[in-house]
Each structure stands twice: as C-alpha cells, then as structure tokens.
Image (cartoon, rainbow, N blue to C red):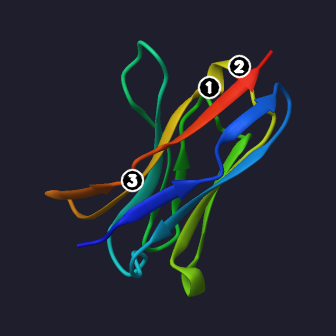
Amino acid sequence: QVQLVESGGGLVQAGGSLRLSCAASRSIFSIGIAGWSRQAPGKQRELVAAMTSGCRTNDADSVKGRFTISRDNTKNTGYLQMTSLKPEDTAVYYCSYSPVPSVSHWGQGTEVTVSP
C-alpha cells in the first residue's frame, strides 16, 4: 500500500503559477501510472495529467502547454507545475497512483483557486 499527500494549493491571480507536490510513502515510479486529477464545483472529476513508469506523459487538452507533470525519484515526490492559470482551473486537485489497473491510491486533495 502507498499513502499520498498533496500540498501547494492556494489562491492565485489569473495568469499566475503554482506548483503542486505529491509526497508518497514509498517509491511509486517503478511500475504503474501516476497522475493528477481535479474536480471543480458541480463537475465530475477529470484527469489533467498522467505519467507512466517509463516517464511517458499525457496532458488533457484543456491544460496542454500550461501544466507540466514531473517527478523526483530521490524524494518519492511528484509535481504538477501550473502556469498561465485561468479561473476555470479552480478546483480541488488530487494525485493518484495505480500500480495495476485493479488498484488505485488517492490523496486527500489540495484546493486551487484562481481569481479573475
């Protein structure tokens, strides 16, 4: 089992940037897929970025070119660098890890609010 803890959320003005962190209780980069999802008020949770154990990445069209997913193996930590933030990016952001398709681990989330 693995535990995930997100941090780095907060209030930022439109056009600004934030970097979210996801600290894992152990290494999560040997196998499986890690990613970031978000849920805005009144909307379903959506995947915004993902990374495989082989460092292949994929971004949602809504954030492509603005968000970057990365990791630091020595710190067991993943990151989501967010730039050119828009009010529609306001949501609770969650990191997740799936070592195999049948198992998923989720953090508690960190709130991001972008003011116009």
Q: Which SS class for mark 2? A: helix
Numbered tag placed on residue 73 in the rendering? none
State the image coordinates of residue 38 (x, y, percent, origin top left): 48, 35
Q: Residue at x 73, y 33 (%)?
A: 11
Task: Name the residue carrying label 2.
Answer: 87
Q: Are marks 3 and 1 in contact (CB under 8 Å)?
A: no
The residue lying toward the viewer, choosing from 27 and 101, is 27
Quarter of the image for residue 39 reads top left
State the image coordinates of residue 105 (x, y, percent, origin top left): 29, 58
Identity, as a three-letter code, of the amino acid under mark 3:
Gly
State the image coordinates of residue 107 (x, y, percent, origin top left): 39, 53
Task: Name the residue carrying label 3.
Answer: 107
Task: Name the residue carrying label 1.
Answer: 90
Q: Which SS class for mark 3? A: loop
Q: CA distance from mark 1 to mark 2?
A: 6 Å
Identity, as a three-letter code, of the amino acid under mark 1:
Thr
Q: Which label sits in the foreground, 2 or 3?
A: 3
